[in-house]
Amino acid sequence: MDSLGNVVFNDREIENERLELANTKANYILGPNLTLRNCTLVLKVSARRLSLKQPRFIDCTFEVKQELKNYQSWVAASLKGCRFKGRLTGCDFGHWPEYMSLPWYQHGSIEDCDFTEAQMDACRIMGCDPATIRFPKWPCFTFLDPIGRARELNSIQWPGGFRPIIVEGQYRDPPRTTAVTFYAPALARRRKTTAEAFRAVIEQFDCIVY
């Protein structure tokens, strides 16, 4: 850790290592010019303590030991063949160069990744093909191509006034959104309804994975 409290991994390639990012007083910076292959990363820090600057993760496992909330910086990383475990809330993955003009946000990607052991809520895949991605099963559920299917998805009444996708106005979902995953129990709490009420509607659509 340097005098500013930063732990920096850059300008190198790391293989078959286990990295524990667990010092709650440190700022972990991964990249630029960093490639990790077949590594396990144990994340025990909050989103504000983790900064990604165009790292490449290949066949890595992420063990999220502390819920990672509202973390958009995955879109500054290249993820291929990776597995995720733990709780991810409000996280974005993939290619979303409009998110920030900084150079490392122009090259994000995700493919062949496995989230089946993760709990995802309000997490989005941006600008990448979700067909190569394995999403968690019920009580998580995933909208595929929500922008393209917005009219259909919004044409019926959802529990608690929920709207699956917003395509107009200040709070609209970005056009690059190709998939969105929710955790039904948490969504039901926010909407003051039940997970079962959501499932009854979900079962009517072929563009939802659950």
Image: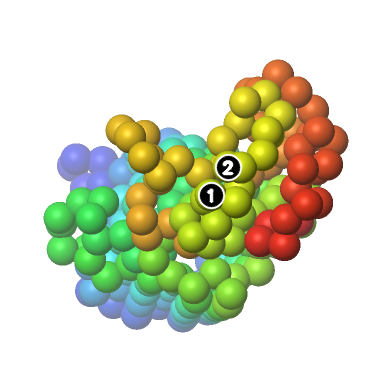
Q: How busy is the neighbourhood of tag 2: few (under 14 within 10 Å), some, or many (20 plus)?
A: some
Pick whichever, 55 or 91, lies toward us. 91
Residue 74 is situated, as x and y percent measured from the top left of the image, at 39, 57
* Residue 4 located left or right of residue 22: left
Q: Is residue 142 above or below residue 36?
A: above
For image coordinates 73% across by 56% down, the residue present is 205
Q: Can residue 35 be seen by looking at this rendering?
A: yes
> Is label 1 in contact with label 2 (beta carbons under 8 Å)?
yes
Q: Quadrant of residue 75?
A: bottom left
The residue under label 1 is: 151
The number of discs equals: 2
State the image coordinates of residue 33 (x, y, percent, origin top left): 24, 74
Amino acid identity at mark 2: Asn
- Which residue occupies the foreground of this view, 19 or 132? 132
The quadrant the C terminus occupies is bottom right
Front-most of residues 59 and 29: 59
The residue shown at (56%, 36%) is 163
Label 1 secondary element: helix
> Percent x, y for residue 166?
45, 41
Alpha-carbon distance for marks 1 and 2? 5 Å
Label 1 crowd bin: few (<14), some (14–19), many (20+), radius 10 Å:
few
User: Which residue has dot 2 on it?
Assistant: 154
- Name the residue rendered at 39%, 66% in the picture: 127
Can residue 65 be seen?
no
Residue 114: image quadrant is: bottom right
Answer above or below: position of 124 versus 164.
Answer: below
Q: Which mark is residue 14?
A: none
Three-letter amino acid code at disc 1? Answer: Arg
Outermost residue to the top: 192
